[in-house]
Image (cartoon, grey):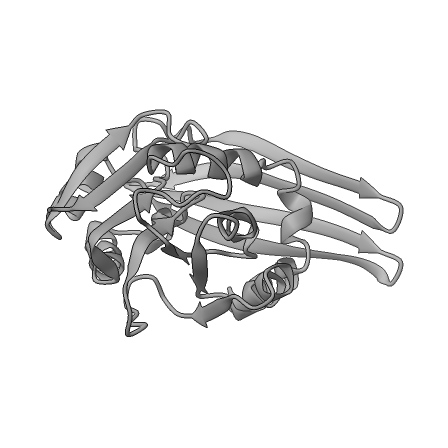
Amino acid sequence: MAETYSKMARYYDKIYAEKDYAAEVERLIAFLGGGGRGSRHAGRRTLLDVACGTGCHLEHLRESFDVEGLDICAEALEDARKRNPGVAFHVADMTDFDLGRTFDVVTCLFSSIGYVKTVDGLRAAVRSMAAHLNPDGVLVIEPWFTPEEWHPNTVHAVYIDEPDLKIARVNTSLVDGRMSILDLHYLVGTPEGTEHFVECHELGLFEVNEMISALEGEGLVVDYDREGLTGRGLHLGRRRR
């Protein structure tokens, strides 16, 4: 898996070029009670983005917060550092990390929480993230699909057509119990040649109440918005005052 991620890290932003990170950050700031871009939000100044990938959310979040990022994929963080010079990035697993400091806001966006796979993994990740909150901090998690929302045996494709780069990504969405499975087949053509490889993703399907229970288990007061940033919902866990 790590080797495949290393291959795809260079194409990640191409695949998700249509994702509107700026608009998502605007919505996130509204959920945090902010007044607009460039403002500080209810005294919150510092933010850690967990599973930050190539740092596209942070590119916009850094306009309003002093930010840091964390991800398990070192290759993705190479792009994140180029996109966000001067920002501190950490290679770590979201289920078990300790940065030795706390933040006003901790985020885990783009449904990355699904990669913890199990309810035990979910609780461990929430525990690690909540441990990095300041006394009045907020933990924001954008969930993956619930079991009811997941539609297995459906076929999906993404195509990139540039003069020196052609990519076709095709997959059939599958399910195994409470696990969603995506075997993403890539056909990548460049002037140097064409190659095919497969990226296997397994993401846990958590019920809304399981997400809320994990946050409440860390002493957080939870607000849940069904629409969220992209239609997948949003959980905000606030430290009790």
Residue at far bottom of view = 100
Q: Quadrant of residue 236?
A: top left
Report the side of 117 relative to 198 (left or right): left
Picture quadrant where residue 41 is located: top left
Residue 181 position within the rendered picture, expressed as x and y whole percent measured from the top left: 43, 44
Q: Is residue 45 left or right of residue 132?
A: right
Q: Report which quarter residue 205 is drawn in.
A: top left
Side of 31 where 36 appears, left or right = right
Identified at 44% across, 59% down, the residue is 67
- Image spot of residue 97 (x, y percent): 30, 69
Residue at x 82% of width, y 50% of height: 165
Give coordinates of residue 180: x percent, y percent: 38, 42
| Numbered circles on residues, count | 0
Front in this rendered view, residue 173 or 86: 86
Residue 146 vertical position relative to residue 58 in the rendered view, above or below: above
Is residue 16 depicted above or below 49 in this figure? above
Measuring from the top left, give residue 39's x and y in whole percent: 45, 42
Residue 126, above or below 39? below
- In the rendered structure, the answer to whether residue 228 lies left or right of residue 178 reads right
Above or below for 189 versus 95: above
Which residue is at a point 52% across and 49% down the rendered structure image? Answer: 63
